[in-house]
Image (cartoon, rainbow, N blue to C red):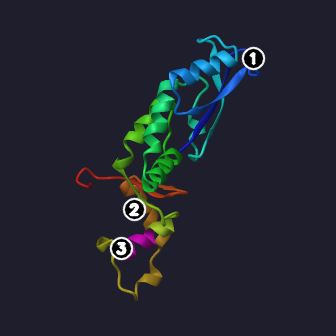
Amino acid sequence: MFLNTYLCDIDNEEKGAWLHFPVTIGDIQKALYHAEISDYEYKFSAYESDIDSLTKHLTEYEDITNLSRHVEIVGAFTPYERDKYQALLQAKEINGIDGLIRYALAVNNYGLLPTVLTAEDLGRFNVAENKNYAAPDTVKPYIKYQALGEKIQSDEGGYLTKFGYLLPKKESED
């Protein structure tokens, strides 16, 4: 994953430098020096990332150490974990880097069905794959898959996202 941010003077956004995370203390000091910014008078005026929806959860005054920590955590994700994380970002209300880290660390508490994008998909998936919703072929044309999917989503507390159906794992699942 990548995360870049424009570190700039609080009063003058033209005085700044791009940081490419993860960063070291030396990287930060060098950026502050070259941009002629006092250590305590900076903000982040822009973010770039390849993680969908990540930047909308970040503010101008995030902790640099936690931004680096976040990049290290998410950078170690498998493609499946990365998709679950992006689905979480789309589904949940998250405030700032602390919330992002909390969800990154909890990504394995969720399951993701990447082919299930709509309530109708969820209904069809459950009739096909879940023995609790099994139906004879003669009945399947009459099933209201949309309504069934909406009911299942409500019961499970899941989220339909562009990455698939995200659902919290039950405590007994692993």
Percent coordinates x, y for residue 146 in the rendering:
50, 68
Q: Which amino acid is tagged 2? A: Ile
Please report the bounds of the magenta region as a residue range: 123-129
Look at the image and tell me whether residue 100 can be seen.
no
| Closer to the camera in the image, 152 or 65 | 65
Name the dominant secondary structure of the magenta segment. Answer: helix
Residue 40 versus residue 166 in the image, above or below: above
User: From the viewer's perspective, is 162 left or right of 85?
Assistant: right
Residue 46 versus residue 8 in the image, above or below: below
The mark found on residue 39 in the picture is: none
The residue that disc 1 covers is: 12
Q: Nearer the viewer, mark 2 or mark 3?
A: 3
Residue situated furthest bottom in the rendering: 138
The residue that disc 2 covers is: 152
Look at the image and tell me whether residue 162 can be seen.
yes
At label 2, counting other C-alpha atoms closer than 10 Å, the crowd grade (few under 14, some 14-19, many 20 or more) is: some
The kind of secondary structure element at disc 3 is: helix
User: From the viewer's perspective, is 16 left or right of 129?
Assistant: right
Distance between mark 2 and mark 3 Cα atoms: 13 Å
